[in-house]
Image (cartoon, grey):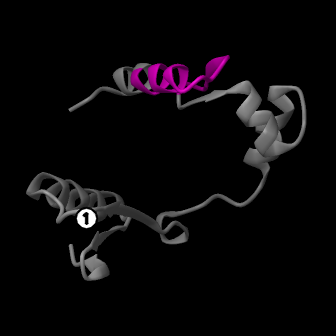
Amino acid sequence: MMSLASAELATAAIASSMGASEPFALAGRYSVSSSSLVKLAGIRPTDAAWSILESGPKLGPSDVRLFIALNCDPSQGLVDTLTIVREHHGLRIDVVVLGPNGLRRVDI
């Protein structure tokens, strides 16, 4: 299992590789570029932007609906991972597959 510190480093590396100019961490939990944060909140500086974003109601797992789109059936590893995420964290991630017969939802 990946430690929190390793996950933060991986997130920062991904953000950097995607062109984020100034990845930073807030309270050891989030990595985001300051320009993305400012665009999302619509205010500068970044401390003010975080205050705006954190002031609203908090989202819970039931407020989020995520989908993974594939062009083939999901691997057993993906199915197992999504099952664990749903059972242990209450976050439902659905899978849809686009194949020769159109789009279909995979029951996991």
Residue beneath the point at 77% across and 44% down: 40
Query: Along the horizontal axis of the image, is 19 left or right of 104?
Result: right
> Looking at the figure, which quarter contains the C terminus?
bottom left
The magenta stretch spans which residues?
A: 10-28
Query: Along the horizontal axis of the image, is 29 left or right of 22?
Result: left
User: Above or below — where is 36 with respect to 76?
Assistant: above
Query: Along the horizontal axis of the image, is 33 left or right of 83?
Result: right
User: Above or below — where is 97 with respect to 81?
Assistant: below
- Find residue 4 and report its image quarter: top left
> Looking at the figure, which quarter contains the N terminus?
top left
The residue labelled by disc 1 is 87
Query: Along the horizontal axis of the image, is 76 left or right of 57?
Result: left
Return the residue nearer the eye: 72 or 26. Answer: 72
Q: Is residue 43 magenta?
A: no
Return the residue nearer the eye: 78 or 1. Answer: 78
The percent position of residue 22, horizontal first and vertical second, equals 67, 17
Residue beneath the point at 53% across and 31% down: 29
Q: Amino acid at mark 1?
A: Glu
Secondary structure beneath dot 1 equals helix
The percent position of residue 37, horizontal first and vertical second, equals 74, 35
Return the residue nearer the eye: 67 or 91. Answer: 67
